[in-house]
Amino acid sequence: MKRKGLMVLPFALWAIIFILVPLGLIAWYGITVEEPVAYTEITLEDGTPAFRLEDGTVQTQEPWQKKAVISFQNFKRMVEPTYLRLLIRSLKIALLTTLICLILGYPVALILTGKDFKHPTLWLMLIILPMWMNFLLRTYSWMSILENSGILNSWITALRNAVPAIDQWFTARGVGNKIIFLYNENAVILGMVYNYLSFMIMPIYTVIEKIDKSLLEAAADLGASPSKSFIRVTLPYSLPGVLEGITMVFVPAVTTFVISQLMGGGKVPLIGDIIQNQFGKSSDWHFGSSLSLLVMVVVLAFMGGLQQIDKDEEPQKEVRIF
Amino acid sequence: MENIILSIRNVKVVFEDGFTALGGVSLDIGQNEFVTLLGPSGCGKTTLLRCIGGFEKPTSGEILYKGQDIIPLPPYKRNINTVFQRYALFPHLNVAQNVSFGPDLRHEDKKETAKRVGEMLELVGLKGFEKRRISSLSGGQQQRVAIARALINSPDLLLLDEPLGALDLKLRREMQLELKRIQRESGITFIFVTHDQEEALTMSDRVAVMRAGEILQLGTPVDIYNEPESAFVADFIGASNILPSTMVRDKLVHFLGVDFPCVDTGFGENAPVDVVLRPEDVKLKPENDPAEGVPFGTVESLLFKGVHYEMKVRSGNDVLLVHSTHARPVGARVKLTVAPEDIQVMRKSDFSPDVRARKGEGGVQ
Ligand SMILES: Nc1ncnc2c1ncn2[C@@H]1O[C@H](COP(=O)(O)OP(=O)(O)O)[C@@H](O)[C@H]1O
Ligand SMILES: [Mg+2]
């Protein structure tokens, strides 16, 4: 018993220092605002003006001190349309990103687990490999492809110069010399899908890989064509992986600020950008923390909802008689 | 055989790693026949079933089902159902949903299906288990769900891969009778796999004894039991006295140091053979009994087995197992008689006791 307690100690310490304390700080900052301390002007015996603060201390400089006061005014501020709109846009972009990752990732995972597919681990490596490259580097390379004077535009220009028909096609649709790919929602979504796709593929691949092949054989034996056995066996069994993938994509997507700043060029601010702003330029840690709490609640609600789906699928436990 | 439903012709399976699991198996199976593949673990029984079910593609050979070559057909296009050795039940579905998997795929009437599921479960002794989770069932119960799940489809051909392996003895006996009854009444052709010789002999119309990817002998249980053609078959179906012998000439065989008249012919003169003697076919007499008999050896042990006594009689290195209703005391010197028709002469094979002793091998693995 004692020994077990000792083994838990390092983790408990770690959890306290790196999880509980920061969370507590954010919660504290979130539910407080700074107010100037109250004071009264007085004159000292030698005639110099001075200030007596609430707590009784006396100083000659004009009071600069602030104190944290518990207040929910930050939460009121959050529901202002400006911030609500940002939150809704962030949710929309994150959900779209998740959906696209699912639509792209599921088939990839399925193909990789196919029994005729040779070297699935090699392909998996190829999918993960770019993820080992620096995140910023990856996003910057997309920017250099999509920029107004970027690779894609220069190719299109070359193509239009070479083939008049294509040029006419573009001109007829009112497309100018350069196509603007960057700095809009689509660019942000592209950046997110590119960065988070492997988070969707991996968990789905893992669960499909683990499905007992004999279950697929049993389904085929009972008359299920490949598509039917996919719907009746593979799909229900891969659901936990799908839910995990959704979480793994949705959570970073709803909180990111780097991608929206780079690919969106500041034109598509998300809730993450505003939070980052509060800790940076605006230097309002209290409002930043309140917003973080809001995002946390959204994420928790989302994951709670997902878990509900998982529970519904999970066979309800029954009492074993024999 | 009049209606052949399945014809397996020279089917070979060589796996990717070069291992030959089936080395050219041929077998014709008649409509409504109960054929058992009997053999030790690893001899290729499951592989042969998987070829018939469509889960394994033979390297060469043909499988004709109702006259049609089914090797190119995927499993779901074959009107054949399988009870898998490892059950392969769907853990995300309950018992009833597992059993109704086939009918549901065919979009059969829900009410009718539910009724049939109930009947099937009753048939396998799991009445009222409809709503139970698979994970809450014991191995034996799961096995019976697997049987119900296959049977409900009324296939023309049912493949059963050691379907009673997880049942305890009493239930096993009951299910043997039940399966046999179902097979007779439903007209379904059964290909049944087991490594239990008693199960094979009691249930089957014909038994195919397999060893290392080959069918060594195919015949009715009585044929297999009474006239094993090789030492392996004799040993596998439980014969105890397999004796290296020499065929002196037609109808005369030499073993235990003595010439015995027999009924077998066609082995040539002075040909090495093996002989099987059933323990119950050997008659012992006291050595001083005036009746005929070959002086043999000494009773080494005596066990009462209920219906009969089991005795071991030794002469030099030879030990003979004898079943008899007359006990001979341990230490008594005896002579023995064997009727010529009770001597089963078999061709020499690499499984003969003397050959194996030379190679330093053990018994059946
Ligand atoms: N996919 C495979 N690759 C290589 N060897 C296999 C494969 N499947 C089965 N075997 C081998 O083939 C032999 C026969 O297997 P199996 O048909 O399952 O035997 P049984 O059902 O009679 O016990 C075994 O030695 C087994 O190890
Ligand atoms: Mg097997």
Image (spheres, grey):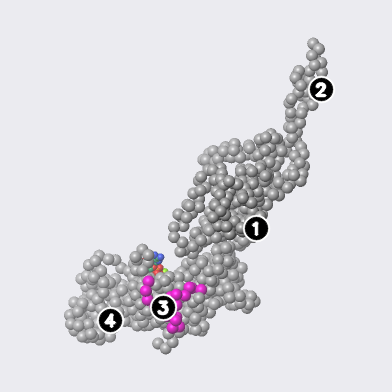
| Image height of A248 relative to B120, above or below | above
Query: For the residue labelled by badge 4, is the local secondary structure a helix, a strand or a loop?
Result: strand
Position above or below: A277 against B131: above
Q: CA distance from mark 3 to mark 4?
A: 34 Å
Tell me which amino acid carries mark 1.
Ala
Instruction: Work out whether B94 lies above or below A206.
Output: below
Q: Which residue is mark 1?
A: A172
Mark number for residue B63?
Answer: 3
Q: Are marks 1 and 2 in contact (CB under 8 Å)?
A: no
Q: Chain of mark 2?
A: A
Residue B46 pos. (x, y %): 42, 71
Marks 1, 4: nearer the viewer: 1
User: What's the magenta region?
Assistant: B59-76
- Where ligand 2 lies, by image quadrant? bottom left
* Residue B115, image x, y percentages: 62, 77
What is the CA distance from the residue labelled 1 to the residue labelled 4? 96 Å
Question: Mark 4 — residue?
Answer: B344
Amino acid type, label 3: Ile
Does mark 4 fall on the same chain as mark 1? no
User: Which disc number belongs to residue A40?
Assistant: 2
Residue B46 lies in the magenta-colored region: no
Of all chains, the one bearing label 3 is B
Q: CA–CA distance between discs 2 and 4?
A: 123 Å
Q: Is residue A241 visible?
A: no
Q: Residue at x 55, y 68 (%)?
A: A227
**In which quadrant of the rendered view does residue B90 lie?**
bottom right
- In the image, B254 versus A195, the foreground residue is A195
